[in-house]
């Protein structure tokens, strides 16, 4: 069935509490209804048959181009007769500027999906890569969920990394439970704070930066604290070591952040601007960026030296839009001096512009931070763990200490055993 109107759709699948038709709950209802109906009608008539149901709910680009085009696509399928079925659900954004071309792209993606489910289910990485066959630069797949008896060992966090790593999207997300999430389902017209970092591992100072900045964010006059979220961002740049991304290293960072109850963004956004562009799809009300003073200085210097040809105001204007605010977390310099947003040693040629950003509250200090924790440097803590030295536990939240020791994360187990011999 296709191209039926909303009334007809509601009669079949029921009305969504949100009133939306292009959403994750809708695709799940469609798969449940169609697969159950097919089994009821055909299971006894077609013994020894593998069944599958394919569904999609799409909002294509409209005449006025107020809708850019996106949708949810799903498939429920058996790999053996009478076996429990598996589910695969995708969120896709269409990049073609014509509705017919978008429809064609969805058709190709549907064929790729059916092939991947039956031929590549044993290799999630190849499955994900194959979805983009003949569709380069025409679609973005920024959500994937695999579920069922044939995917019990597949981790949604790793799938998020694969989507970004293989260029199907610049941004993917997963929640505190490690399951895939999509911004359209929980961020639409909400406020969001993003904290980019290495998190190798998350330390007490990492936790303090999240706590103090998010509380300050929620206390802003124009933010409803009940409608505000915080997410940690892991970029491919921060995940690479000697040009290589190690799956185990990524999973350790992801599990550590989830253990702290945090949702995570995996991105290929070197600049914050690219992340901001992606998040603009969800009409974020207020966006806060937690940035350490040292990292902010690097951003300021990069923009200054790359744009001295007259584009300086444009470069900064792209980042500091009306609804974006940077929260600067202080750091200790190598000579133990405190570097804050106020004391940032910016180049002379940009001092007046920077001062304007501070005075206009586009850049603010994180206020309620714990100065006693600023001496903690994650790289030094990581070295202590990897060298099997004592004392690293006091720099980490207790929940992570237990997790690291239980699972031998961040190199602790191997080094610890070696030292203990």
Image (cartoon, rainbow, N blue to C red):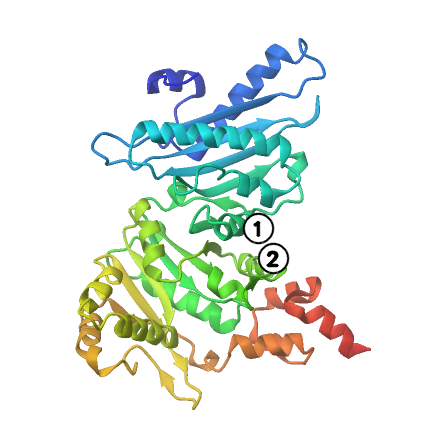
x and y, in percent, of residue 7 in the image: 34, 17
Q: Residues within 10 Å of mark 1 (few under 14, many from 20)?
A: many
Work out whether residue 271 or residue 283 is closer to the camera in this orientation and state it: 271
Left or right of 385 on screen, residue 195: left
| Quadrant hosting residue 270 | bottom left
Residue 109 against residue 184 in the figure, above or below: above
User: Which quadrant does the N terminus fall into?
Assistant: top left
x and y, in percent, of residue 224 in the image: 30, 52
Cα–Cα gap, marks 2 and 1: 8 Å
Q: Are the residues flagged by discs 2 and 1 in contact, CB closer than 8 Å?
A: yes
User: Which quadrant does the C terminus fall into?
Assistant: bottom right
Work out whether residue 349 or residue 88 is closer to the camera in this orientation and state it: 349
Left or right of 49 on screen, residue 1: left
Residue 323 against residue 23 in the figure, above or below: below
| Quadrant hosting residue 120 | top right
Mark 2 secondary-structure assignment = helix
Q: Which residue is mark 1?
A: 158
First-in-chain label (2 vs 1): 1
Residue at horizontal 27 percent and vertical 62 percent from the top:
319
Work out whether residue 266 or residue 193 is closer to the camera in this orientation and state it: 266
Q: Any mark on residue 334, and which?
A: none
Residue 376 against residue 5 in the figure, above or below: below
**Any part of residue 323 in sight:** yes
Mark 1 secondary-structure assignment = helix
**Any part of residue 177 in sight:** no
Work out whether residue 60 or residue 387 is closer to the camera in this orientation and state it: 60
Residue at horizontal 33 percent and vertical 35 percent from the top:
69
Q: Residue furthest right?
A: 421
């Amino acid at each position: 069935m296709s191209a039926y109107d909303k009334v007809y759709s509601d009669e079949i699948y029921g009305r969504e509490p949100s009133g939306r038709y292009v959403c994750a709950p809708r695709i799940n209802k469609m798969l449940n209804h169609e697969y159950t109906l097919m089994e009821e009608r055909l299971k006894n008539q077609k013994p020894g048959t593998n069944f599958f149901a394919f569904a999609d709910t799409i909002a294509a680009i409209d005449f006025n181009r107020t809708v850019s085009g996106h949708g949810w696509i799903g498939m429920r399928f058996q790999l053996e007769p009478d076996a429990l079925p598996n589910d695969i659900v995708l969120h896709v954004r269409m990049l073609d500027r014509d509705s017919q071309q978008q429809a064609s792209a969805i058709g190709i993606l549907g064929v790729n999906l059916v092939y991947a489910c039956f031929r590549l289910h044993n290799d999630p990485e190849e499955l994900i890569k194959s979805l983009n066959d003949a569709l380069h630069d025409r679609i973005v797949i920024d959500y994937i969920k695999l579920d069922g008896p044939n995917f019990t060992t597949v981790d949604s966090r790793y799938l998020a990394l694969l989507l970004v790593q293989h260029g199907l999207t610049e941004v993917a997300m997963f929640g505190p439970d490690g399951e895939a999430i999509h911004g359209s389902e929980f961020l639409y017209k909400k406020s969001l704070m993003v904290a980019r970092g290495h998190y190798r591992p998350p330390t007490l100072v990492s936790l303090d930066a999240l706590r103090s900045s998010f509380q300050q964010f929620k206390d802003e006059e124009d933010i409803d604290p009940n409608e505000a979220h915080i997410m940690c961002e892991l970029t491919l740049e921060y995940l690479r070591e000697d040009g290589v991304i190690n799956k185990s290293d990524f999973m350790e960072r992801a599990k550590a952040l989830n253990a702290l109850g945090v949702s995570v963004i995996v991105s290929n956004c070197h600049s914050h601007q690219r992340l901001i562009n992606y998040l603009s799809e969800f009409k974020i009300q207020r966006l806060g960026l937690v940035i350490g003073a040292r990292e902010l200085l690097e951003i300021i210097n990069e923009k200054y030296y790359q744009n001295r040809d007259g584009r300086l105001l444009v470069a900064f204007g792209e980042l500091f839009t009306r609804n974006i605010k940077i929260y600067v977390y202080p750091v200790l310099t190598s000579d133990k001096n405190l570097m804050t947003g106020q004391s940032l040693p910016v180049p002379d040629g940009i001092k007046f512009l920077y001062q304007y950003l501070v005075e206009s509250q586009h850049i603010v200090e994180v206020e309620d931070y714990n100065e006693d924790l600023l001496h903690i440097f994650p790289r030094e803590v990581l070295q202590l763990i990897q060298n099997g030295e004592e004392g690293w536990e006091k720099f980490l939240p207790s929940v992570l200490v237990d997790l690291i020791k239980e699972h031998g994360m961040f190199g602790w187990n191997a080094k610890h055993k070696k030292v203990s011999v």
